[in-house]
Amino acid sequence: MQNNIQNNLISWYNQNHRHFPWRETNNPYYIWISEIMLQQTTTEAVIPYYIRFIETFDTIDKLAQAPLEEVYKLWEGLGYYRRAKHIHETAKFIVENYHGQFPTTYQEILKLKGIGPYTAGAICSIAYGFSTPAIDGNVLRIISRLYALTDNIALSKTQKKISQIVSELLTGYDASAFNQGLMDLGATICRPLNPQCQQCPIASFCKAKQTGQEKVLPISIKNIKHKELQYITGIITYQNQYFMVQNPAGLLENLYGFVQYEIESPYRFIEEFEKEYDIPLSLISYHGQVKHVFTHRTWHMHIYHFTLSQPLLSMYELDDIAKIPVSTAHLKVLKQYLKQI
Ligand code: SF4
């Protein structure tokens, strides 16, 4: 076998790859679910969610027929809940348009909601063996180092250039093992800091290593504004019941949480609440703050306890809260509050 990048990477992958439940199948539906779960989430965190999800919905038909709330419940704690909504909508679309069979071409897969070029490339190469690149941050880093590219990988023109390089490398080789080999290499050896070049199966081809740039590359200058938001978050109770609302839209769409306003005082909170719900509130106590970090924003939630003089609709006892899908940010708020009473 010729000693080249592709063969070295593929045989290293075949002998050393990490074992995950989604690697024991080439069912495109299961691979799709795993790829969506793995977006923004670590493999360790995904494993139990993936197993539970596939056990509950072992076919696209079952997923499409389930109520959205059940899908959210299985997703609870995994974050980025829009993914669950897209999966559910897409399952229905596949049942209606493809008789419940996952589509079989890259272009059709790319048109599905919540699936971008990376996910489409990963599904096509892993499930069908197509020569489609799957370009994520790991691949951008490895290819930049391999070819000593000094282009900014945050720019889409660099990403296109790297996609073209991977596409040429892949053609004629085992695309599934090649793409997954890059994923594993990036996760275990060619890591962002301190790459372990002495263990790298493609070190003899790496221009960054040859020129001493492996700890400098890639260049990645992002221009993302991270927003810091301050909220007053209200634990509003009537006797042993908690008032919780379902978010109609936005970052936590469809998930339940406590009422919160982006204001600077609990007294302003009362004014806002009375305007919105037309019922008086009494301020009882302060319970500290919790922080929740999303990709482009951080919420600082200052927790206050208020009481109602009469119940509202949408009140839940603690046992009921465990049965509805609640955002992780607001579960943190509840935990902090319960710690102190
Ligand atoms: S030799 Fe080092 S820098 Fe180059 S690909 Fe391998 S781990 Fe990455």
Image (cartoon, rainbow, N blue to C red):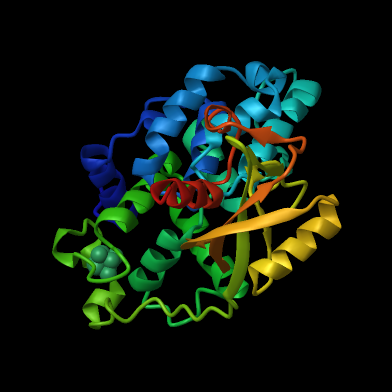
Using the image as rendered, state which of residue 130 and residue 180 is in the foreground: 180
Q: Residue at x 40, y 60 (%)?
A: 138
Is any part of residue 131 visible from this angle?
A: no
46 sits left or right of 313 in the view: left
338 sits left or right of 226 in the view: left
Question: Is residue 325 shown above or below 266?
Answer: above
Ligand 1's image quarter is bottom left
Q: Quadrant of residue 193?
A: bottom left
Using the image as rendered, state which of residue 17 and residue 43 is in the foreground: 43
286 sits left or right of 60 in the view: left
Question: Is residue 157 shown above or below 287?
Answer: below
Is any part of residue 149 visible from this angle?
A: yes
Using the image as rendered, state which of residue 325 and residue 112 is in the foreground: 325
Instruction: Tally the marks.
Output: 0
Q: Residue at x 41, y 51 (%)?
A: 340
Residue 331 locus on image (x, y percent)? 51, 46
Question: Is residue 229 shown above or below 88?
Answer: below
Residue 6 locus on image (x, y percent)? 34, 52
Image quadrant where one finds the N terminus: top left
Q: Residue furthest left?
A: 198
Q: Residue at x 53, y 27 (%)?
A: 319
Using the image as rendered, state which of residue 40 and residue 198 is in the foreground: 40
Residue 280 locus on image (x, y percent)? 78, 53
Residue 80 locus on image (x, y percent)? 58, 49
Q: Quadrant of residue 17?
A: top left
